[in-house]
């Protein structure tokens, strides 16, 4: 028997719609459920991340803005800058997630779109996660130098006794570079752990569709 | 939120194509729970995309695209962690079906063979068994017709081998 003859089995044995009254209500009930697909879950996680940042950073910002007689307001603005950066980060990721899926498109083009957008998403995730740390460290360092300038006699003192390593910006830069490289690899590992298998499977599916 | 008239129209269309949606769920999921989850997800995706449906293709073509895209892209094979529906409120078509024993065996053998295929092959077999033309298959999957024919021949051969010793006797002289 050939596959064609299985069509009979397929058509006759499979369930036929009954179209009873209750099923209409059941379908309507399903319309109000939220999506549980991977992209919908990623978007929900991103929103939760945004809410967490707002909830934790806003009180910290207000604290530094009004406490210490406003002398540490620079740190408050640092938190403000962080929130602005995070808003940009959120906007970009959310836009990529919106673009990621086109369920009404052809299966192949939807897979191509998912693979391409997921790769962009991963690249952005890795780079943003990596550069956020050194950029914020440098800004923090500059704010501390601005708010807590060295005392007038310290230059003479260090010239006599020698400058300790932690006073040298070059030492900090020397630490920041390997730390940034380390953070980059941690990010790569983490992103791969999160999306590696998913993207690999999508690529395999796409390859299967494209091969002659 | 879409208008009640649109909702009513949508529900009717879904009811008309209910069996096809169930077949997709049956092909791509192994457990009843996963099938119900996938069914729910397909309905949610259909409803979200419905305002964009402009009738440029047949409704069934559009439906197949969304159902297959949802099933293929959503690669979770394990039980999904979502709030399950109350079993009393599940669509009746998704509850266990009872067929005559012989027919049930035939159906199981057919699914057992198809279950050994890849996700893409399953989609092709499903469309083939559903009597979709190669034109429509191309429109749904985005694979050109020559490639589709080559793939279909390979799948037929694969299924013959897979079911060689089953009660269907596929591939037997």
Image (cartoon, coloured by chain):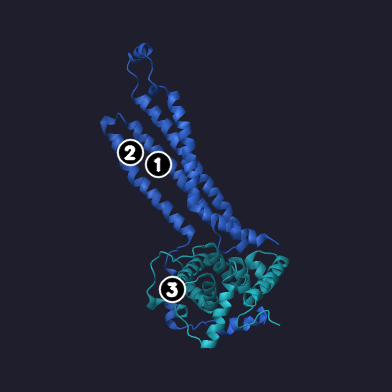
Disc 1 secondary structure class = helix
Q: Earlier in the sequence, mark 2 or mark 1?
A: 2
Q: Which mark is residue B132?
A: none
Residue on which disc 3 sits: A28
Q: Residue at x 57, y 79 (%)?
A: B109
Q: Is residue A109 visible?
A: no
| Marks 2 & 3 on one chain | yes
Left or right of A209? Residue B32 is left
Is the N terminus of chain A in the top left, top right, bottom left or bottom right quadrant?
Answer: bottom right
- Check disc 2 and report its element: helix, strand or loop: helix
Name the quadrant containing residue A209: bottom right
Q: Earlier in the sequence, mark 2 or mark 3?
A: 3
Residue at the disc numbered 2: A61
Query: Foreground: B120 or A77?
Result: B120
- Image point 62% across, 83% down: which residue? B168
Q: Percent x, y for residue A92?
A: 50, 47
Name the subunit of mark 2.
Answer: A
């Amino acid at each position: 028997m050939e596959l064609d003859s299985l069509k009979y089995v397929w058509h006759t044995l499979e369930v036929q719609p009954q179209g009873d009254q209750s099923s209409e209500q059941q379908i309507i009930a399903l319309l109000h459920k939220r999506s549980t697909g991977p992209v919908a879950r990623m978007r929900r996680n991103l929103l939760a991340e945004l809410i967490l940042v707002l909830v934790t950073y806003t009180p910290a910002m207000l604290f530094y803005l009004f406490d210490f007689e406003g002398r540490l307001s620079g740190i408050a603005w640092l938190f403000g800058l962080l929130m602005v950066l995070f808003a940009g980060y959120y906007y970009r990721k959310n836009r990529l997630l919106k673009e990621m899926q086109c369920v009404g498109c052809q299966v192949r083009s939807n897979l191509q779109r998912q693979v391409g957008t997921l790769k962009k998403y991963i690249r952005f995730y890795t780079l943003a996660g990596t550069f956020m740390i050194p950029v914020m460290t440098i800004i923090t360092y500059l704010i501390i130098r601005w708010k807590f300038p060295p005392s007038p006699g310290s230059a003479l003192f260090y010239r006599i006794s020698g400058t300790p390593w932690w006073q040298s910006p070059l030492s900090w830069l020397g630490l920041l570079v390997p730390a940034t490289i380390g953070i980059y690899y941690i990010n790569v590992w983490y992103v791969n752990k999160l999306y590696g298998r998913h993207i690999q499977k999508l690529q395999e599916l796409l390859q299967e569709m494209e091969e002659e | 939120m879409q208008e009640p008239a649109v909702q009513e129209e949508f529900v009717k269309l879904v009811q008309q194509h209910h069996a096809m949606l169930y077949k997709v769920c049956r092909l791509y999921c192994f457990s009843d729970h996963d099938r119900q989850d996938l069914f729910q997800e397909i309905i949610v995706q259909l409803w979200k995309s419905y305002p964009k449906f402009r009738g440029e293709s047949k409704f069934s073509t559009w439906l197949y695209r969304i159902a297959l895209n949802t099933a293929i892209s959503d690669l979770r094979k394990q039980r999904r962690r979502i709030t399950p529906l109350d079993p009393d409120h599940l669509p009746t078509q998704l509850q266990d079906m009872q067929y005559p024993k012989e027919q049930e065996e035939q159906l199981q053998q057919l699914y057992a063979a198809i279950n050994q295929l890849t996700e893409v092959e399953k989609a092709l077999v499903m469309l083939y068994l559903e009597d979709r033309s190669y034109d429509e298959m191309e429109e749904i999957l985005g694979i050109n017709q020559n490639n589709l024919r080559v793939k279909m021949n390979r799948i037929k051969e694969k299924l013959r081998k897979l079911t060689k010793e089953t009660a269907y006797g596929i591939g037997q002289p």
